[in-house]
Image (tube, rainbow, N blue to C red):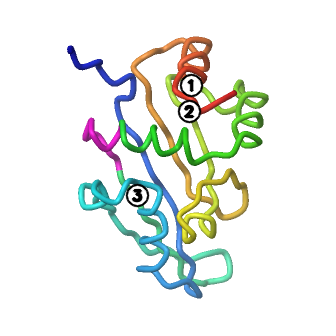
Amino acid sequence: MAKVASPVVYIDVRFSAHATENLEKTKKAVCNLFPPDRKDKINFTKETIKGHHGNLITLFQARIKDKEVLQAFVEKLSTGLSELDKETMSREAKLLVERSNLYLRLDKQAAVENQMRLYRADPIHIRIHFKRKDNRSIIELCRELGLMS
């Protein structure tokens, strides 16, 4: 059987950890979004900045290009998101898809519990970059992949 080419080119993951948060625990929570056997293939860069009130904030970023990791993440996301989140994404699709990218914000606290949930406050930022360029075809592809209802 021929292997189907992945429609995803790369995934960017970005999140912050405040001075009051345990950096390793936060990073481990984000890694929970990925299948356990793929976590070692994700390398985060780390940058420390000062917040508005002088508090330290650590920014983590990773760009994932490994095809197996990309496929495993999309599969886990499609099974991990609730139907309510998928409906929300479908309703807000025109806001979430732009220039070959699907933008998501996931809950850090849910990730600690190995769950996936959309969230807006202090989220894990996910950008899934697709080969397709047309927003409409990306939205349809997201439905086919089980990311939207």
Instruction: Locate the C terminus by quadrant.
Output: top right
Residue type highlighted by circle 1 = Cys
Tag nearer the camera, 3 or 1 = 1
Compare marks 3 and 1 and give the one earlier in the sequence: 3
Q: Residue furthest left?
A: 1
* Residue at 21% across, 14% down: 2
Residue 102 got which mark? 2
Taking the image as shown, residue 85 lies to the left or right of residue 25, namely right
Q: Is residue 56 above or below residue 45?
A: below
Q: Residue furthest bottom?
A: 20
Is disc 3 placed on a helix, strand or loop? Answer: strand
Residue 132 lies in the magenta stretch = no
In the rendered image, which residue does mark 3 sit on? 61
Residue 92 spot, x, y in % from top left: 76, 31
Taking the image as shown, residue 38 lies to the left or right of residue 54, namely left
Tally of marks = 3
In the rendered image, which residue does mark 1 sit on? 142
Residue type highlighted by circle 3 = Gln
Residue 82 spot, x, y in % from top left: 69, 45
Residue type highlighted by circle 2 = Leu
Q: Write the start and end of the magenta stretch as one range.
A: 63-70
**CB of mark 1 within 8 Å of CB of mark 2?**
yes
